[in-house]
């Protein structure tokens, strides 16, 4: 081709054919479609010297396959390919050749060096294009189904990016943009509700949990049975496992022998040694997750079936014999693998034995409770509830009663925690210690009584969260120093880790060093915080659902805080607190009647009013 650019030559400008109207430092072009431009030579590509008539350009691919076959193994110029396509080098054949090159199905290269693809390459490109066209058609059909709110069950995977926005996992979704929806979580949730994939009462926090971890652990129990280990026979002791009605994972029991307390804990570490697949998955899961809808355990159910105290005729345990020192601190006399016969009962039933079979245990533990309070322990009088929601129409909110048996069990576990912490410290066994800094200093003249609900609410703001570290320290809220959590190895990984260290020590095996223990608890910390947040938000969600189902609901409330605008009201029966803007003057401690007039699930609020 003559590369000298002349007037009326055919060029390509921005992928469109154009005709040269005049030449100079800048070339004036007439572009197909009626537009014009003045550009430099570097901005266009010459494909035919002209003269050309843009209106007369025709695309002709009738001899395309013959041109492709002829070009196998050859190197062609654009003019040569044009001649193969149109029998002559004309503006129309040059334009057709350029389109063939740009299309890329049969040919590749640039206008001076064009090669023909082999048959295998052409087949591969065709297959790729067919797949792409099929995918585009499916996408178009999918978008139409969304617009008509008629999605199929098979569409759920394609909606994952919208679900991710609805669950606050992503900020944007290309699909939402195509549908001209706002890139907000609320908009994504509303669309999923309209599509019938979610119900208005869907607990998004439960969905977040299921994306965070599987409902059940993947690993299965492979290690030996606990019966294959030598254990001390303590079946002569009356061991009480006291828990909530319906509890399915009893992991502690208590006995009194003379002037010593036995705290028996499920011996999980005998089946889950450190470093095993079960241990690693338990560490990744961090703890049991308790939601109103379901429980997601840290460990496989078969471990609870073998080790849960009182689930079998004889239960294996790690038993801690503890005594109170003269000053009140708990001291560990011995810790040993054991066999028990466990009596299971509920808190309510145990309370009825406060002056009967359990009197000795309760009296023993009252003394430890008094010791803790003398050390500054804070028992905040703030209500707690247990919420179950098998389905939206079957929600139960049950206040947790702080009876004698619940207080006794709590103090038994705290005695064990202090005794084990002291034992580990004395024997240089690295374990995670739990501590809490003393409350921040109150403003001068302010004194808060933790037994008064609104003052306990205010005092809570001055408390730092509990932390875990390798260095022992005081736990201000519990009134103990040192202290470790060790009584729930079925439910919390840090407790299991303490048990693994104790068992290694008892067997005279090498215990884990501080760096290994630190790495183990470091990974669990964030996960545990996440799980507690999911539990808290889920309880709030189902409380709102329950309220939305109550017609003309009223309940007792306590004003627990006066804000710069509005007040915070606490509903003890629901352990539910919310800021409101009453029309009457209220101060901290005022009791009132709370009335409900609307629940806004999207905003996560109940619209309440109060009256004295």
Image (tube, rainbow, N blue to C red):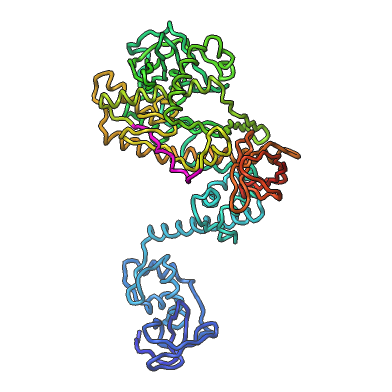
Question: Is 147 above or below relative to 551?
Answer: below
Front position in the image: 357 or 345: 357
Residue 609 shows up from this direction: yes
Q: What main secondary structure does the magenta stretch of the protein show?
A: loop
Magenta extent: 432-445
Q: Is residue 27 left or right of residue 74?
A: right
Q: Does the magenta segment cover residue 75? A: no
Front position in the image: 53 or 228: 228
Question: Is 102 above or below relative to 453?
Answer: below
| Image point (55%, 14%), residue name | 354
Residue 302 shows up from this direction: no
Q: Position of residue 85 (x, y in %)?
A: 44, 75
| Residue farthest along the top direction in this orientation | 236
| Image point (49%, 20%), residue name | 408
Question: Is 477 above or below relative to 358?
Answer: below
**Which quadrant would the C terminus be assigned to in this image?**
top right
**Labels in figure, total:** 0
Front position in the image: 33 or 166: 166
Displayed quadrant of residue 555: top right
| Residue farthest along the front direction in this orientation | 445
Q: Position of residue 414 (x, y in %)?
A: 42, 25
Q: Position of residue 241 (x, y in %)?
A: 49, 17
């Amino acid at each position: 081709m003559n590369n000298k650019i002349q007037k009326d030559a055919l060029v390509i400008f921005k992928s469109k054919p154009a005709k040269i109207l005049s030449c100079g430092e800048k070339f004036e072009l007439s572009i197909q479609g009626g537009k014009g431009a003045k550009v430099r030579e570097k901005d266009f590509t010459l494909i035919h010297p002209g003269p050309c008539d843009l209106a007369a350009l025709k695309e002709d691919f009738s001899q395309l396959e013959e041109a492709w076959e002829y070009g196998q193994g050859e190197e062609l110029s654009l003019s040569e390919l044009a001649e193969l396509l149109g029998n002559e080098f004309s503006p129309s054949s040059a334009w057709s050749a350029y389109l063939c090159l740009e299309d890329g199905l049969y040919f590749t290269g640039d206008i001076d060096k064009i090669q023909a693809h082999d048959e295998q390459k052409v087949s591969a490109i065709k297959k790729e294009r067919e797949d792409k066209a099929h995918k585009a058609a499916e996408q178009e059909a999918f978008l139409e189904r969304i617009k008509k709110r008629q999605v199929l069950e098979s569409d759920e995977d394609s909606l994952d990016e919208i679900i991710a926005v609805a669950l606050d996992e992503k900020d944007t979704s290309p699909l939402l943009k195509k549908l001209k929806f706002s890139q907000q979580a609320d908009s994504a949730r509303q669309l999923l509700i309209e599509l019938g994939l979610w119900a208005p009462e869907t607990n998004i926090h439960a969905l977040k949990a299921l994306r965070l971890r599987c409902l059940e652990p993947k690993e299965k129990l492979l290690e030996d049975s606990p019966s294959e280990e030598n254990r001390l026979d303590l079946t002569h002791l009356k061991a009480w496992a006291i828990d909530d009605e319906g509890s399915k994972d009893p992991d502690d029991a208590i006995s009194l022998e003379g002037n010593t307390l036995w705290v028996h804990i499920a011996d999980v570490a005998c089946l889950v040694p450190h470093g095993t697949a079960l241990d690693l998955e338990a560490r990744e899961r961090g703890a049991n997750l308790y939601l109103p809808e379901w429980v997601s355990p840290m460990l496989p159910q078969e471990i609870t079936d073998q080790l849960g105290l009182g689930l079998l005729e004889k239960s294996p345990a790690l038993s801690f014999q503890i005594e109170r020192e003269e000053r009140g601190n708990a001291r560990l006399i011995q810790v040993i693998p054991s066999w028990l016969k466990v009596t299971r009962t509920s808190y309510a039933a145990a309370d009825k034995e406060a002056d009967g079979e359990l009197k000795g245990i309760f009296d023993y533990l009252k003394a430890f409770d008094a010791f803790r309070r003398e050390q500054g322990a804070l028992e905040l009088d703030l209500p707690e509830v247990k919420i179950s929601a098998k389905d939206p129409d079957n929600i139960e909110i049950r206040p947790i009663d702080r009876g004698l048996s619940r207080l006794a069990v709590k103090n038994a576990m705290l005695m064990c925690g202090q005794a084990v912490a002291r034992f580990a410290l004395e024997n240089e066994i690295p374990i995670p210690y739990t501590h809490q800094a003393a409350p921040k200093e109150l403003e001068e003249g302010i004194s808060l009584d933790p037994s008064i609900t609104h003052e306990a609410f205010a005092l809570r703001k001055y408390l730092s969260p509990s932390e875990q570290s390798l260095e022992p320290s005081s736990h201000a809220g519990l009134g103990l120093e040192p202290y470790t959590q060790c009584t729930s190895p079925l439910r919390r990984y840090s407790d299991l880790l303490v048990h693994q260290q104790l068992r290694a020590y008892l067997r005279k095996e090498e215990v884990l060093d501080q760096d290994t223990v630190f790495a183990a608890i470091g990974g669990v910390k964030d996960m545990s915080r996440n799980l507690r947040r999911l539990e808290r938000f889920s309880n709030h969600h189902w409380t709102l659902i329950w309220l939305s189902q109550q017609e003309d609901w009223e309940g007792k409330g306590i004003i627990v805080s006066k804000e710069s605008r509005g007040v915070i009201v606490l509903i003890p029966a629901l352990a539910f607190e919310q800021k409101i803007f009453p029309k009457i003057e209220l101060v901290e401690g005022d009791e009132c009647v709370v009335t409900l007039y609307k629940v806004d699930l999207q905003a996560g609020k109940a619209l309440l009013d109060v009256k004295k």
